[in-house]
Amino acid sequence: MRRSPLTFPARLTRPSIGGNAAGFTRRRFIGAAGASLALLVSRPGTAAQTGILAVRVWPAQDYTRITLESREPLTFTHQLVHGPERLVVDLEGIELNGVLQSLPTKISGQDPYIQLIRAGRNRPGVVRLVIDLKAEIVPQVFTLKPVGEYGHRLVLDLYPVEPPDPLLALLEKLSPEEAAAGVPMPARPEPSSVRPTRPAEPGIARRQEAEPPPVRPQPAPEPPAARRKPAEDEGVSRLVTIALDPGHGGEDPGAVGAAGSFEKHVTLSIGRRLKARIDAEPNMRAMLTRDADYFVPLQQRVSKARRVQADLFVSIHADAFISPTARGSSVFVLSERGATSTAARWLAQRENAADLIGGVNLGVKDEHLARTLLDLSQTASINDSLKVGKAVLGELGTINRLHKGEVEQASFAVLKAPDIPSILVETAFISNPEEEARLNDEAYQDRMADAILRGLKRYFAKNPPTAKSKLASL
């Protein structure tokens, strides 16, 4: 009889511990110490098993991440199995504890890529995870060293074979009139890189062949005398694309307030509200670098903005400082010559460490993303960033105290797109108890979104965008 690669014991028992901490007697302490000593002097070839401290699952359309955390480094092997699609991970020297047994309960039916997870003892000293998949995936499996509040982590990133295209996703939400108003179409791929797509239904295909798109009448050209520079309340002549970047997410909570508020939740809520307001404008559309609670590396945030050929990049954060009395809103732009203040330098260093906390697979090399973050000549982009930053800062001052009365500069990695004006908005200090309460108030989040939008409109009214420039190859 062939043995199943994944076997579960008929019954799992764990030793019960009676009493509480106060009842931990001297005899029990000596017994526990003796057991620890026995492990230390155990015979060669044996070792104490490591327990998993925590398991977390972060589902998203971009990818789903599974994180296993332990005190000691994890030894593992993994393989993809087809027919049906599965990812099998063997953890060596791991005990099957309650934390691992809870992993199947963390998978929701809405997960784009995971059907279910099974965990069981495969053979002595080895726990096997079998991840049943909804579709074929491209896995990235890597480890992370301890950082911040985290211990050793094993990360399983499940990427789709066909990654989502943010530009196509943006175009699908536009009406034909809006799409014709200046949103760039995706570049045609080279023949060797064309991926197969699902064939259209026969009926739809026939209709498309038989009915050519209607030709819209072109308006008569405006007389030169009637042309004039647009005023602040007239808007712009083409659709403006704005990339909104809610800071942190997933494994990276960002700053944590005294009442336990996570910066990642506040920034996503404000980002969604701002996106809804921008999309309601007749000449503006927004794209979120993340639309759920998952981690996006700093480089990929910039890359997503460039993929949609954004006219502006707005990163949204909630500041924190070692003193709970610090308060106020701020706007930052990139600096090529160092930070404008010690606080700005400290903040940039903290934000740039997000990749260490969120967890980036350093084994994956992407030359395009590396080029994106090169310190290129960005004088024009920084000048535009300062203009839009000043406009937004002025509007933030109408709803909150300003931490500094001028736009500050520092070397933020997320602002280093060489061809997109970029600003980082610190909405308020989440480390200040009063401002933390305001940041969690929906009415205040609405006012914050309104203020940022007013600043963006002021900037584009005075600096209407020109025709879309040809960016570097996407």
Image: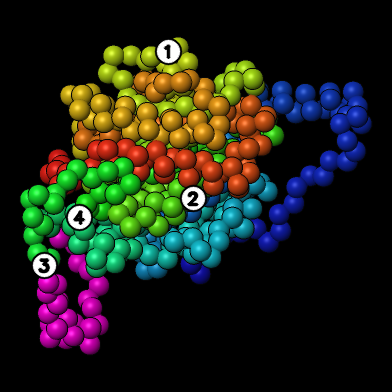
Along the line of sight, the residue nearer the viewer: 123 or 113: 113
Q: In this view, does 221 lie to the left or right of 113?
A: left
Secondary structure type for disc 3: loop
Secondary structure type for disc 2: helix
The residue indicated by pointer 3 is: 218
Mark 3 or 2, closer to the camera? 3
The residue indicated by pointer 4 is: 182
| Residue 252 at x, y percent in the picture | 50, 36
Along the line of sight, the residue nearer the viewer: 163 or 32: 163
CA separation, marks 3 and 4?
15 Å
| Residue 62 at x, y percent in the picture | 38, 53
If you read the primary sequence from the N terminus, does the residue marked by circle 3 or circle 4 appear first?
4
Mark 1 or 4, closer to the camera? 4
Look at the image and say whether residue 190 sits in the magenta stretch.
Answer: no
Quarter occupied by residue 363: top left
Mark 3 or 1, closer to the camera? 3
Determine which of the numbered discs, if any, sits on residue 392 in the image.
none
- Vertical placement of 55 versus 428: above or below? below
The residue indicated by pointer 1 is: 341
Say if residue 445 shows up in the picture: yes
At a point 29% along the width and 49% down the height, the residue shown is 234
CA separation, marks 1 and 2?
31 Å
Query: Within 10 Å of the Cα at label 3, are there few (<14), some (14-19), or many (20+) other Cα atoms?
Result: few
CA separation, marks 3 and 1?
53 Å
Query: Within 10 Å of the Cα at label 4, are there few (<14), some (14-19), or many (20+) other Cα atoms?
Result: some
Q: Which amino acid does label 4 sit on?
A: Gly
The residue indicated by pointer 2 is: 273
Q: What stretch is highlighted in magenta?
A: 193-218
